[in-house]
Amino acid sequence: MPEVHDLGLMIDSRIPLIVIQSHEETRVLDTVTRLAIKKSLPLFSWTVTDGLKRLGFGFDLEQEDMLKDPEKVLEHIKRSHTASLFVLCDYHPFLDDEPKHIRLLKDIALTHRNNGHTVILLSHSLEIPGELRHLSANFKMRLPNADQLINIVREEAARWSQQHYGEKVKTDNKTLQQLVRNMSGVTFEEARRLARGAIFDDGAITQSDIPEVNRAKFELMEMEGVLSFEYDTAKFTDVGGLESLKKWLQQRRVAFVEGKSEAQLDPPKGIMLLGVQGGGKSLAAKAVAGMWGLPLLRMDMGALYNKFFGETERNMREALQLAELMSPCVLWIDEIEKGLGQDGNDQGVSKRVLGTLLTWMSENKHPVFLVATANNIKALPPELMRKGRIDEIFFVDLPTLEVRNIIFSIHLQKRGLAPANFDCALLAESTDGFTGAEIEQAVVSALYSAAALGQPLTTELVLEEISNTQPLSVVMAEDMFALRAWAAARCVPAD
């Protein structure tokens, strides 16, 4: 086990206090036990329920009841003269506003050269007091790699097979590899839980299991708040047009999703989707995750901001760290200009948030593909859009005649209606200047009219709703013209 070697190096470096933050208490204790056997060191563990116990040697200490007390156990360690390893499990509550406990730990650390004790503080979360920080070091348990994840899936498949009279778990190599990629970033025990969830319901690992595994992984990491998990990712068959964007993404799929390329190409970093409101930017962002078979995380810029000084920047850092843990994934920042706009009325918060995001975009090495959508790109700082931070800026324009025809077919099919029963070509001609959202709303409104009349939906009813609609391209003609003119020479057309 590499952890045994790494932890041994820390002990050989004579570090008196070692902090391990992990939910895998059993695995950590097993690692420390292996190390103690290897180095012939006595090993003791302490919990507030069981007191101080010697691990692996079958006997307890004298005055065990007394050693359940968090203060008494530190006094015992301080008096002990035999160099030993002590693992204190969940000791973190006894370090909050407890100066005597902190002082006892400091005394133990300062006399390390004489007594040789190493105290390991093991907890799911622990903030080491300032007095002990220079006397301690953090140790992080390794997460399973791809080979170990495959072995975990195979072990859980074998367990399911034993319980079902030798029946084999059904899957294919492509789905198995995708499952393993999406399980990266979790602990060994969490990986087993995810594998069981994918296998034990039907004895198969299929594409339908991938979104469930992604959502379960998101819940395990307790990411709710600034980030939300988008369960329903769209397929590009649900998106009319955007052929240039689809081609661009298809060319980069293997390099990003599988992390390999014959030409040793750098994996793509992200894109900016600029366009008119209702043009399909959000749907396209969802479709990136659906096309690549990756989890989609949405950053809520409203939840990011906090009234307390420094909290907003910390929220951004934590959100980006959590996205890295969920990698490979797509990180969608919707209407990014509302969170990073340069209005100068927020005491510099947006500038500090921008600095955090820019640093991450330049230095990030994890497979997190950024998709930012914007309606007003002029409100964004130029350094956000330079090459090297994002790969391309795509402009989602008003749909063409051909694309409008496709959009009508899509929305009719989604509602169980056959496009062949409608004159989609006429509908497309009648909606010049309409966005995809406005076309969908025309179909929805016509369905309400049909229901009120007690008759099936017809082309005439849809045309009537179209005639009653003033599209955004008319209501805000000047702004729309300026946006399209600006984008014509500066962006890549998404269609």
Image (spheres, rainbow, N blue to C red):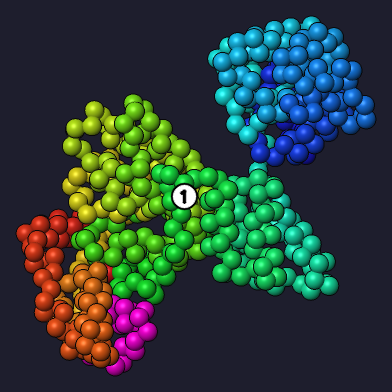
Rendered view: 411 above or below 210? below
| Rendered residue at 6%/59% (across/down) | 478
Type of the residue with mark 1:
Val
Residue 456 position within the rendered picture, expressed as x and y whole percent measured from the top left: 27, 90
> For this rendering, which residue is in front, 269 or 168?
168
**Quadrant in which residue 214 is drawn:** bottom right
Left or right: residue 4 compared with residue 473: right
In this orientation, does residue 339 appear?
Answer: yes
Q: Which residue is mark 1?
A: 368
Part of the protein shown in magenta? 403-425
Rendered view: 53 above or below 164? above
Residue 330 position within the rendered picture, expressed as x and y whole percent measured from the top left: 44, 54
- Label 1: which secondary element: strand
Question: How many other residues sit within 10 Å of disc 1, few (<14), some (14-19) or many (≥20)?
Answer: many
Rendered view: 228 above or below 107? below
Residue 14 position within the rendered picture, expressed as x and y whole percent measured from the top left: 73, 16
**Quadrant in which residue 443 is drawn:** bottom left
Determine if the magenta segment contains residue 354: no
**Quadrant in which residue 252 is drawn:** bottom left
| Rendered residue at 32%/60% (across/down) | 282
